Amino acid sequence: MEKHTEQERIRRNSLEKIKEKGINPYPAEEYRINTNSVEIKSNFLSDETAPRGISIAGRIMGRRIMGKASFVQIKDEKGRIQVYVNRDEICPQEDKTMYNEVFKKYLDIGDIIGVTGDVFVTKVGEISIKAKTIKILSKSLKPLPIVKTDATGETYDDFKNTELRYRQRSLDLIVNEGAWETFEKRTQIINSIRNILNKQGYMEVETPILQPIAGGAAARPFVTHHNTLDIPLYLRIANELYLKRLIVGGKNGVYEFAKDFRNEGMDRTHNPEFTMLEFYVAYKDYNWMMGFVEKMFEKVAKEVCGDTKIKYNNQEIQLKGPYKKIAFFDAIQEKTGQDISNMTNEELFQYCESKKIETNNSMGRGKLFDSIFGEFCEKDLIQPTYITDYPIEMSPLSKKHREKKGLTERFELFINGKEIANAYSEQNNPIEQRKSFEEQVELSKKGDEEAMLIDNNFLTALEYGMPPTSGIGIGIDRLTMLLTNKKTIQDVLFFPQMKPDKK
């Protein structure tokens, strides 16, 4: 049996009383609105020019019930506005039930109502609506946590607990002023990037989320099963291999804002479901991509934040290029005084052990290099920095460096100690690509659950010829964190993944 609090029981009783009056508290028909709270306030000049015949809808956020006249504050999509409710105005006939009973007794904070009327200014100078009609659009059965502040300034009933906010995002968006701002900026970021790429003539595309092979990245996938085909399928960990097939098909530039899924750990910068922008441009290399990214980030920062200098966690970060560049092994040597580039596997394990870096027997050279870099370098890369020229063992989809043996033409962009983007001069030699895949298979046999599988369909596409290409993946969630000054990825996702509620 469903349990209700006293307040919930009162509201359900009010619901029944409203229905007894012949009023549907959840009407199906369209309620036409012709303005919003911000428009009303911005268009108001004087009583003579005040908007007339307005229709608005919103949620009741405050009430002052008096005798024949009362005030309610409603919140719509844009903001809040006060509504003056006079008994004789909304009940011009003899029957005053709508005001005396329905409005005064059965409406609650949280209910959604429609209001028609005229705009006026109160004696204390507040722009308000004088209601002519009030219509119930949705009865709220749970009370809102309305914030109260006592004489000492102490706040009560606020909705600030982060876990509750993530679990009850709808409530968070209702009661916390500014909660929508982060997500509006997220949309701005995506739209800004989309406009930049569209102006370049690149085509936005869609690629499969369910894939027969989890390819395009080193990560542990989520596995499911297709009953009709009787095959395992994977939620995509990346869309890289499909996008490069489209480059083979003849497009010079393609991109996708993709939902990717990785069955890995969760922390302040990782969620099992995340958004990645990937785009690929033919006849370009990773040097060109560095310049393009700098210009793109500069433009996005200006459009979203108003400046290329942003504040993040008490740090001032300059997103206008050029960005610092440092080679992978040089960055490690700068921090440790040690050149690890020519170390054997055994020597790398010993080095990690001496530095108390966690390892396991399945780790190849690539993961050992990555662990050392993560331990000593990442956290200090505050200003935008390109880490370039990664070892071959870490970059199975990248071209070998044209000048430096054992390295690849790859960069990762770090800002505020976190990877924001990963880019290559893409491997377009099908013979070399097959060799790299085969090396990944050997790592898999040793127990590396994140090693790539051989994607024969992708290799077949490469054999028809892919032009020289540069590609990049940009983490939209992390970029949003950066541009909205949020410390956790959960703050920039409407509905982050959570452990099941024990209740």
Image (cartoon, helix red, strand yellow):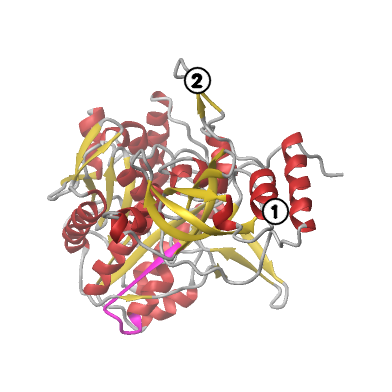
Callout 1–callout 2 Cβ contact below 8 Å: no
Residue 349 lies in what quarter of the image? top left
Of the numbered discs 1 and 2, the one sitting upstream in the chain is 1
Q: Which residues are magenta?
A: 248-258
Q: Is residue 289 left or right of residue 270?
A: left
Q: In the image shown, does 2 or 479 lie closer to the viewer?
A: 2
Tell me if residue 397 is in the magenta stretch.
no
**Residue 140 in sight in this render:** no
Residue ID at (43%, 47%): 492
Residue occupied by mark 1: 97
Q: Is 5 above or below relative to 450? A: above
Residue occupied by mark 2: 150
Q: Quadrant of the C terminus?
A: top right
Q: Amino acid at mark 1?
A: Thr
Q: Residue furthest right?
A: 1
Total number of numbered discs in the rendering: 2
x, y percentage for residue 371?
39, 38
Dot 1: within a 10 Å radius of its alpha carbon, few (fewer than 14), some, or many (20 or more) residues?
few
Residue ID at (46%, 73%): 207
Q: Quadrant of the N terminus?
A: top right
